[in-house]
Amino acid sequence: MARQGWLPVILAMVLAAAVLLGNQSLQLGLDLRGGHQLSARVLSPDPEAVITAADLDGVKTVIQRRIDGLGLAQTQIHTVGSDRVVVQLPMARPAQGEEAEDVVDDTLQQAANQITKKAVLQFGVLRSSEVDRYETLIQERRDARVAVFLGQQQLEQLRRSRGDAEQRRAIREELEGFQTAFDQLEQDIGQLFDLRPLTGDDLLQVVAEPNLESQGEYYQLSLTFSSKGAQAFADLTKEVAADSNLRLAILLDGRSISEATVGREFQENGITGGGARITGTFTLERARELEVQLRGGSLPYETEIVEQRSVGATLGSDNVRRSLSAALVGLALVSGLMVVVYRLPGLVAVASLAIYALFNLAIYALVPVVLTLPGIAGLILSFGMAVDANVLIFERIREELHSGHKLYQAVEAGFSRAFSSIFDGSVTTLISCLALGYLGSGLVRGFAITLGIGVSLSLFTNLVCSKTLLKTSLFLYPALRRIKYFQPVQ
């Protein structure tokens, strides 16, 4: 029997997965790491009005900006269903001399205030006396934006590589300083503008699209105003176009998120027609960011807190311990049963399951996948399905042996005959996972993701790894080429 060409590939993948797990940590959900969760419902003043996914995403972005301003690390914000935004906050750590309960209450209250405060989108004109100061602050904001980006990248790299805790703390404190400076600069820039009677309520539509004049290299924003807003925007742009030193600013919650000039050709009537384009060197990411910010700022909807949940750090670690204990006990029992019933193939199945577990965790760290209790349930279920596939293969091998086929032929036929059943079962499960992931939310989606990853990986480990390990064992150790090693322990 020829040596297995897959063996070097499998060994390389195992080594890569082990190195990846050694350098990157898994991300744990609220129920495992401890923390707080606030669920907010977006309210529409018109019962018949439909809150679109784009509107909900806009609300999420505004809340994200506000929560980030609190200086809380590792916050997670996502939308649920058609009208919910869920904010997950890390467990607050009291400083020396502070009561933990006071810190928790204060953190939650600040977060709740930021979530329920209505977004205010306004338009303004730069005061002519502030032109020089504006140019200075704009350059300082560019520098601060770069510093924040580099700090975030460095902190994320250290977190994934499990770098020195003191170094991470120092960088986090430095990053908080950069973020505070950036926020303050946006606030200071916003104060250089005189507000005009044009707000987010007058903005009907915002679309990020390619700027055809730049041959698709850059993107632009197309704005559509209400009839009232169209006249106010025309007056505003007429004023700015008359002086090349002036700027038009869009302010969200008092912070300038974008500034623009207006061409001199509009100094007579302003930009009329109820529409406008904001052009520049916008990348797709920056254009979409501004689009979502403008959508969120122009929403007339209010939000209310409908659920508040806290999970203590001790309870989170207890959940991790219990989940790991249950998984290890289950795997030990299954492994023992496989060895007793199938002997050599059972040992191969145990090795294949170990590889399967390693690959799963490596993908969780790489993507990354936020691991929750339902996610662990999905992982354990996928282990059961992987074992079931191995049982199906080994039973097919036994049937071939009982039919009088030689050992090598029985192994080949067993894997070939089991393939269609395993593949069909995996595909149907993946379809269910896709449905759960698309229609479900939060914890249900976490279950679907881990189960889907597990089922996909099991196709490789069951049909490739198990076969390669079994045939390699028979090739390297002739003493194992006996039928008795494929029969149950007597």
Image (cartoon, rainbow, N blue to C red):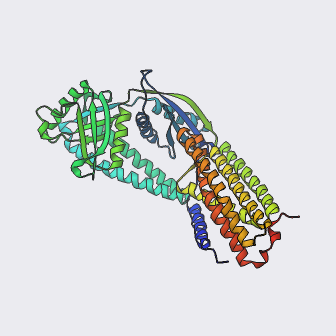
Q: Is 160 left or right of 298, judged from the image as shown?
A: right
Taking 155 as reference, is 313 above or below it?
Answer: above
For the N terminus, the quadrant is bottom right
Q: Give coordinates of residue 384: x percent, y percent.
A: 70, 52
The foreground one among 275 and 178 is 275
Outermost residue, right side: 490
Does residue 97 show up? no
Q: Which residue appears at 67% of the width and 67% of the height?
A: 467
Q: Which residue appears at 64% of the width and 47% of the height?
A: 378
Taking 245 as reference, is 464 above or below it?
Answer: below
Q: Give coordinates of residue 53: x percent, y percent.
A: 43, 35
Outermost residue, front side: 403
Taking 225 as reference, is 445 above or below it?
Answer: below
Q: Give coordinates of residue 87: x percent, y percent.
A: 52, 38
- Count of labels shown? 0
Q: Which residue appears at 53% of the width and 41% of the height?
A: 438
Q: Give coordinates of residue 401: x percent, y percent.
A: 78, 67
Q: Is 474 left or right of 309, judged from the image as shown?
A: right
Quarter assignment of residue 308: top right
Q: Which residue appears at 26% of the width and 37% of the height?
A: 249
Does residue 407 show up? yes
Quarter assignment of residue 32: top right
For the C terminus, the quadrant is bottom right
The foreground one among 89 and 71 is 89
